Amino acid sequence: MNPADYDAWYATPRGRWIGETEYALTSHLLAPQPSDSLLDVGCGTGWFTRRAAADDLVATGLDLNADWLDYARAHSSPSLSWVEGDARALPFADASFDHVLSIAALCFVDDERRAVAEIVRVARRRFAIGWLNRTSLLYREKGRDGGSGAYRGARWHTPGEVRAFFTGLPVSKLILSSAVFLPSAMRLARRLEQGMPTKLLWGGLLLATGERA
C-alpha cells in the first residue's frame, strides 16, 4: 500500500471513526497538557502525529520508511518534526519526551520487546502502545491467514502476550484497555462503542499504557 492510499483511508467515514476512537482512548489515558512533548513511534504517514499536534502538543513522528516520512512532511505543518529511525534503537536520550505513543506499529517490527523497552526509555512521563488484538472481531475479519489489506503481515497479540512485553521493565501503573469493538463503524457500532467499558479487552485495538518508574 502506498502512503497516499493509506492516509486517504483515514478520510473515509470508517477510517475517520476508527482513528478518532483510537486517539480518544489514547489521549484520555495519557492525559497530556498543552505544550507537552510527544513522540509517535512508527508514525507512517503521520495521522496520529498530526492529530496530537491539533491538541497543541509538540509532536514528533518517527518511522523507518523514508518515503512515508516524505509524505508526512508534505502534508503537515512545518512545526512538526519528522525523524527517520528504528523503533528498536530510538535516536533520543533517556526521558526525551513527556509522552510516547505507538499505534498498531510494533506489530510490524521484529523484536517487539526491544522496541517496547526503547519506548519506555525515552518516555519522561507516560507511554501508550497499541497492538492489534487477536481476541477481537477485527481479527476474525482482517487478521486470519496472514491478514488482508493494510493488516497483511501484522502480528496479532492476546492481552497476556502484551503484558509479557513489559516484564522486567521499569514501568508502573501498567493498564490494558481496548477500543473499536465493532469495526464496521456503522451507526449501531458507533452507539455501542460509547457504552462499552474499555477494560473489556475484546476490541480491535489493545492499548497498554503506563508510567516510567
Image: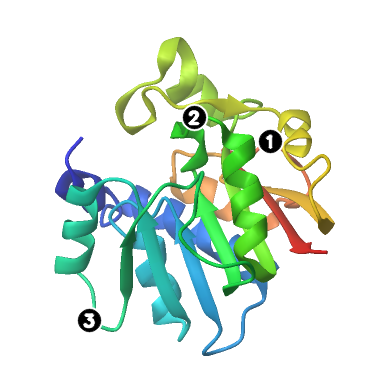
Residue for badge 1: 202
- Kind of element beneath mark 2: loop
Q: Which residue is drawn at 51% across and 89% down?
A: 35
Q: How far apart are labels 2 and 3 at the CA level?
A: 31 Å
Identify the residue at horizontal 39%, vertical 29% (top origin): 151
| Residue 177 x, y percent position in the rendering | 72, 50
Residue 183 appears left or right of 177:
left
Q: Position of residue 180 (x, y in %)?
A: 56, 45
On screen, residue 112 above or below 61: above
Three-letter amino acid code at the position of disc 1: Trp
In the image, which disc is placed on residue 86?
none
Question: Is 175 rendered above or below residue 111?
Answer: below
Q: Nearer the viewer, residue 29 or 201?
A: 29
Q: Mark 3 points at which residue?
A: 78
Please state which of the two labelled residues, at mark 1 or mark 2, is closer to the viewer: 2
- Number of disc labels: 3
Sequence-earlier tag: 2 or 3:
3
Badge 1 crowding class, 10 Å Cα cut-off, few under 14, some 14 to 19, many 20 or more, is many
For residue 181, say whether it is visible.
no
> Which-is-in-front pick, marks 2 and 3?
2
Q: Which quarter of the rendering shows the N terminus?
A: top left
Crowdedness near tag 3: few (<14), some (14–19) or many (≥20) residues, C-alpha within 10 Å:
few
Residue linked to disc 2: 110
Considering depth in this image, is 110 or 45 the residue closer to the camera?
110
Which quarter of the picture shows residue 2?
Answer: top left
Residue furthest out toward the bottom: 35
Q: Which of marks 1 and 3 is nearer the N terminus?
A: 3
